[in-house]
Amino acid sequence: MKKSIFIAILSSVVLSAGCEGFLEEAPKLTQSSELTMSTYQGLNKAIAGAYSPLVSSNWYGAYFVLDAEMRSGNARKSPFDSGRMYVPYEHSYNENTTAGLWGTAYFVISSVNNVIDNIEGKVGGTVTQKMVDNLKAEALFLRALAHFDLVRLYARSYAFDSSKPGVPIILHTDPTGAEQPARETVKAVYDQVIVDLLEAESLIDPTYARTGVADAKAVVTLPAIQALLSRAYLYSQQWQKAADYATLVINNPKFSMWTKEQLPDVWSVESHLTGEVIFDVYGKPTNAYDAYWEGPTQMTSPKGYADCGASLDLVNLYEDGDVRGELFQTDAKAPGSFWTTKYSGKGATPADVNNVIVLRLSEMYLNRAEAIINGASVSGVTALSDLNVITLKRGAAEYTSVGADNVYNERRKELAFEGHYWFDASRTKRGITRTDYDGPAAKKDIPANSYMFALPISKRELDVNASLVQNEGYTN
């Protein structure tokens, strides 16, 4: 399982470009003696740089989230569309037109592996063991997040068959490029994600927060590790652990549910010092990785490209009085069309960049409710009480009883346009049904057992690594 991989564009140091705007004091943009693996200071700057690719167009900065919405039926192409999102909407993926996350995520994995592999022996002088442990915890979290998102995108869900091919597990960076790692099983990938997160949890100081950053929620903290553990356990159907980790976050006084009055305005702030956000990706135009013109603010705004509209399937789910139904805008030039306002921009221009929320408190309530329905037990808590925490804050009708379908539908309404519904449909084996859709009829609905829930691996990766096998349904 302990594989190595070589990324051609990776030097002996890790990501230093693209940090300007993320850190208030940006690290150097080229290799120097300050950015080697031989010093704690170099490793620290390397980890700071490793956050930057998360905001790229291949990941949370655009298409990892928005493409999932287009595939799922939450989103649809709009009257203003420029053709940028036809592939996910029509699911016309092949080995030449597929998601670009593979290269970006493995770039980050290789980068943080370099830190992990060189972190021993750095204690001394002003550098304490606690400082080194916190740094390693950040690296382990980023490696876990990257592997987790890769296996969600390029493999079938754990619930479908955990013995099916997942993605390569890369724990060391091979500078020679000699190794050609094969795909591990889905279960093996999830096991490694959880191992990394548990080690990160054991290492990080509960009070640790990286200094010198513009957004304190865009870096690894103990609650972020625990929230991702809750999600990973949920996806791998370890219900009690999913509930237990969700409870740790829910009980953390640092977080509180947004109220009905707050919800419309929370999406466009520079940083979230209070409220629901546990971990987000910080958007800044000066970050070289930022998608900007193809970021979510442009792609979901009628003042921008507007390719990613909101479907009536989604918009019509909200009852009168539910503030979440008010998070959609229309445009006089396109009557009857809607766009989400979760990416309305945090700058002065009509459609500037946004922070993209990855983990937030309401998901923890939803995780726990689903886990309880599947057999988990938490003292003093029921699935009904957890769902009603959300409805109370959103102006929606309270539930009087709940089942798995209620939790599934509430996840869709609460987490719309945050990249969840596609993966929820896969892992709960429900499939996708679309009504407000005008693409090819053969791709309108996606049954639960469809090969389309695992995206193809690109031809370039297959060409350079003979050990990789393509996902079913995409071979010629």
Image (spheres, rainbow, N blue to C red):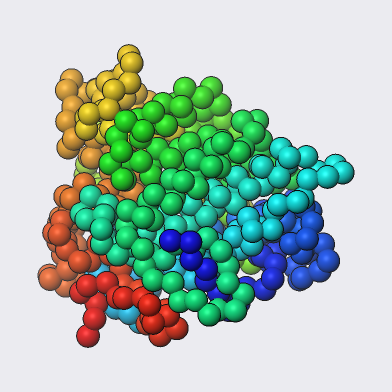
Vertical side of 464 occupied by 136: above or below: above
In x, y percent, where is residue 218? 59, 46
Please state, as top left, top right, bottom left or bottom right, where the N terminus lies in the image. Answer: bottom left
Q: In terms of image quadrants, where is residue 7? A: bottom right
In x, y percent, where is residue 194? 43, 45
Q: What residue is drawn where x is 44% and y is 50%?
A: 193
Q: What residue is drawn where x is 55% and y is 74%?
A: 6
Along the horizontal axis of the image, is 472 left or right of 393? left
Q: What residue is drawn where x is 36% and y is 55%?
A: 188
Q: Nearer the viewer, residue 16 or 215?
A: 16
Q: Residue extending furthest top?
A: 380
Q: Nearer the viewer, residue 35 or 439?
A: 35
Vertical side of 382 occupied by 147: above or below: below
In x, y percent, where is residue 121? 75, 51
Along the horizontal axis of the image, is 289 left or right of 316? right
In x, y percent, where is residue 235? 31, 45
Q: Nearer the viewer, residue 392 or 7?
A: 7
Vertical side of 287 occupied by 415: above or below: above
Residue 359 visible from this viewpoint: no
Vertical side of 391 occupied by 217: above or below: below
Please state, as top left, top right, bottom left or bottom right, where the C terminus lies in the image. Answer: bottom left
